[in-house]
Image (cartoon, rainbow, N blue to C red):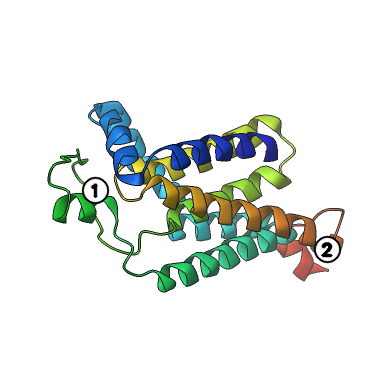
């Protein structure tokens, strides 16, 4: 999971260094307009919602208390970091606001049904949550197909934020990095190698003992 993400991070960094965020977003926005893709990204973006994360955490906790605890801590800590950074840069404008208010020479496409926000763009909270939660799931599952699926969900959910013009590429890159780093860090602190074995079981089994 680490190597594919690092390669993706290098590609993203290449584009961020080579182009300014305005022209980069304008170029990426040209991908919109396909009904299937527009609908897909409107739905996959919710993988980064806090409510979705809490539901996944609750289900995981019932199935395995240790994994659920790990998932919750990764989600909570990454969320706190992202929120703190957002509060330090509350005037970071999102693409919709920047293009609508200041960049009239760059008409961009919007997806019908998507509520456009104005501020607190950096970093992307959805990207942070998607990577914290789904990378955590990928780390503790042993099924290789599931590992790939969880990583793809995190990547696509993060990318949807730029596709829907809710965030710049730099926002989702940094957001994903926060989620990724937090998930990997707490995986080694809480799970690997063979830690917290006393709660490495379904939640109800702990109370029954």
Q: Looking at the rendering, which quadrant does residue 87 occupy?
A: bottom left
Asked if the residue under mark 2 is in contact with the one under mark 1, i.e. CB atoms within 8 Å, the reply is: no
Residue 162, given in percent of the width and then of the height, sits at: 36, 43
Instruction: Report the Cα–Cα distance between label 1 and label 2.
Output: 42 Å
Q: Is residue 160 above or below residue 194?
A: above
Q: Could one spot residue 132 in this view of the protein?
A: no
Specify the quadrant that holds the N terminus.
top right
User: Which of pointers 1 and 2 indicates the residue nearer the eye?
Assistant: 1
Residue at screen point 57% across, 67% down: 76
The crowding category of the residue bearing disc 1, from other C-alpha atoms within 10 Å (few below 14, some 14 to 19, many at least 20), is few
The crowding category of the residue bearing disc 2, from other C-alpha atoms within 10 Å (few below 14, some 14 to 19, many at least 20), is some
Judging depth in this view, the residue of 108 and 130 nearest the camera is 108
The residue that label 1 is drawn on is: 114
Specify the quadrant that holds the C terminus.
bottom right
Residue 147, given in percent of the width and then of the height, sits at: 65, 36
Judging depth in this view, the residue of 24 and 39 nearest the camera is 24
Residue 81, given in percent of the width and then of the height, sits at: 54, 67
Is 113 situated left or right of 61 in this image? left
Q: SS at mark 2?
A: loop
Q: Is residue 64 above or below residue 81?
A: above
Q: Which mark is residue 19?
A: none
Q: SS at mark 1?
A: loop
The residue that label 2 is drawn on is: 196
Q: Residue furthest front?
A: 18
Q: Could one spot residue 166 in this view of the protein?
A: yes
Residue 185, given in percent of the width and then of the height, sits at: 72, 57
Residue at screen point 70% across, 31% down: 144
Sequence-earlier tag: 1 or 2? 1
Q: Residue furthest left?
A: 104
Q: How many marks?
A: 2
Residue at screen point 57% across, 55% down: 179
């Amino acid at each position: 999971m680490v190597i594919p993400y690092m390669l993706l991070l290098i590609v993203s960094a290449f584009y961020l260094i080579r182009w300014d965020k305005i022209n980069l977003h304008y170029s990426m926005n040209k991908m919109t307009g396909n009904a299937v893709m527009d609908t897909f990204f409107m739905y996959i973006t919710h993988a980064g919602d806090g409510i979705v994360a809490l539901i996944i955490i609750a289900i995981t906790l019932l199935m395995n208390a240790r994994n659920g605890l790990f998932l919750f801590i990764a989600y909570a800590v990454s969320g706190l970091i992202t929120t703190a950074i957002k509060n330090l840069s509350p005037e970071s404008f999102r693409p919709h606001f920047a293009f609508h208010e200041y960049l009239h020479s760059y008409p961009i496409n919007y997806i019908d049904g998507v509520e456009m926000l104005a501020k607190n763009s950096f970093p992307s909270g959805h990207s942070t949550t998607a990577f914290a939660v789904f990378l955590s799931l990928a780390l503790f599952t042993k099924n290789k197909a599931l590992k790939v699926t969880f990583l793809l969900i995190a990547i696509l959910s993060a990318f949807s934020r730029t596709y829907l013009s809710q965030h710049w590429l730099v926002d989702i890159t940094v957001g994903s990095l926060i989620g990724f780093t937090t998930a990997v860090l707490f995986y080694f602190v809480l799970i690997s190698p063979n830690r917290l074995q006393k709660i490495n079981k379904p939640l109800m089994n702990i109370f029954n003992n």
